[in-house]
Image: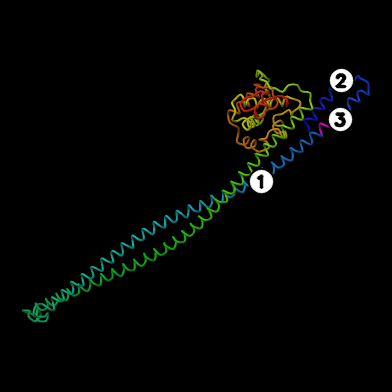
Amino acid sequence: MKRYCKYFNHQNQKSNHALCKRPTFITCLCIGTLSFILTVSCALNLVITGVNANTQSKLNETNNTIAELRKKQAELSDEYSSLSNQMQVVDNRIYSLQKQIQEKQEQINEVEGQIDKLDKEIAKQYQAMKLRIQYMYENGNSNFMDVLFQSSNFSDFLAKTEYAIQISTYDHNMLAHMNTMVHEMNIANDTLVADMSSLQELYKEADAESAKLSALIASKQNELSKFNEDIEKFEQLALEYEKQLEQERILEEQKYSQQGSHSGNNGSYVNGNGIAINHSASDLDMLAAIIECEAGNQPYEGRLAVASVIINRMNNPRFANSISEVIYSPGQFSPVASGRFAVVLSRGACDDCRRAAQDALNGNINVDALYFIGYRGSIDDDKLKIGDHVFFTYWS
C-alpha cells in the first residue's frame, strides 16, 4: 500500500502545483477527484495485500513447521549418532571378548592336551612299574626272596635289597610327581574354564546390548525417514505457496499498472554506463544472494539483468530507495518469502553471482526494466527475453 499511496501522493503534489493558479472550485474539484482515486487505489491495494498476507501467513506457518521438523530431525540425528557411537563401543567390546574367548579356548586346549599327555605318561609309568615288580617277584621259577637268599654274602644281599628299594621308591615318586602335575593341571584347567564361562557371560550381555541398540537404531532410522518425508511434503507445500505468492504479485502489479497512464511495456537493453552505487558489504551480499536465488542457473547476462532490476527499482520513486528495502518489500521476491534467500545469504552466494552484483553496483546496468518473470510463451513475446526470463518496465 505504501508504494501505491506514495505514487498517487506524488501525482497529487504535481496536480496541486499545476492547479494552484486556477479558480478555487476547480482546484477543489480536481483535488477531490484525485483524493477519490487515491482512496480507491489504496482500498484496492488493501484487498490485494490482504490476499498476499493470507498466502504469506500460510507460507510462514509452513516454513515454521519445516523449521520445527528440522529442529526435531537434528535432535533425532544427534540421538542416532549417540546410539551409533554406543554401538561402535559395544561392537569393539564384542570383538575383544571374542578374541579373549578364542585365546582362552586355545589355553584350555593346551592344558587339556598336557593333562592327556600326563595321563598317558602315568599309564605308561604304571605299566613299567608293574613289569619291574613282576620281574623282581616272578623271575623264572624263583621268586625275589629266593634271589635274595641266593646272595653270595651279606653285602650282596644288602645290595640287592637296596636296588629293589630304589626301584620301588623311584616308581612311587614318579607316580606321585605325575599325579601332582595332573592335579595342578586340572586346577589350572578349572580356572581357565571358569574364566571362559565369565567371558561367555560377558559376551552374552554384550550381544544382548548390541541387539537392543540395533533395534533402537532401526527405530531412529525409521523416525528420520518419516521426518524426511514430512519435511519434503511441507517443502513442496511451501513451494506451492511461493508460486501462489508470485501469481498474486503478478496480479497486483497488473492491477496497479492499469491504474496508471503508462505506454509500452517492453524492457530494453542499455549501454551499461550507469553511475556507481555507494554500497556496503552487506548490500553486495544481499544483491548477490537474490541473484543466485532468482537467476543462479542463468547466463551472466541474465544474472546481471536481475541485478539491474534491483538497482532500477532503488532509483525509481515508486519503490524503496535501498537494496535491502527493495529486496525485502512484501510480496516482491518469492525466495525471500520461502526462506531460500536467507539460506543463500547465510552461506554466501557463488562467485559468479557476486561478480554480477558487483558489476551492477559499479554502474554496469544492462536493462532498463523494473520487473522480470519466467518466460510464459507467446504472451511474453512483446517483452525483452534473456535466458529463461522476460524483463519489462510496466505490466500490460
Write the residue at 65% across / 17% down.
271
Question: How much space separates mark 3 and mark 1, taking CA atoms?
Answer: 43 Å
Q: Residues within 10 Å of mark 1 (few under 14, many from 20)?
A: some
Above or below for 104 versus 71: below
Q: Are marks 3 and 1 in contact (CB under 8 Å)?
A: no
| Residue under label 3 | 36
Q: Residue 74 at what x, y percent from top left?
A: 59, 47
Q: Which stretch is magenta?
A: 37-42
Above or below for 110 versus 217: below
Q: Residues within 10 Å of mark 3 (few under 14, many from 20)?
A: few
Question: How much space separates mark 2 and mark 3, taking CA atoms?
Answer: 18 Å
Q: Earlier in the sequence, mark 3 or mark 1?
A: 3
Question: How much space separates mark 2 and mark 1, taking CA atoms?
Answer: 54 Å
* Residue 215 counted in the magenta span: no
Q: Are marks 2 and 3 in contact (CB under 8 Å)?
A: no
| Residue under label 2 | 18
Quarter of the figure with the C terminus: top right
Q: Earlier in the sequence, mark 2 or mark 1?
A: 2
In this rendering, the label closer to the viewer, 3 or 1:
3
Quarter of the figure with the N terminus: top right
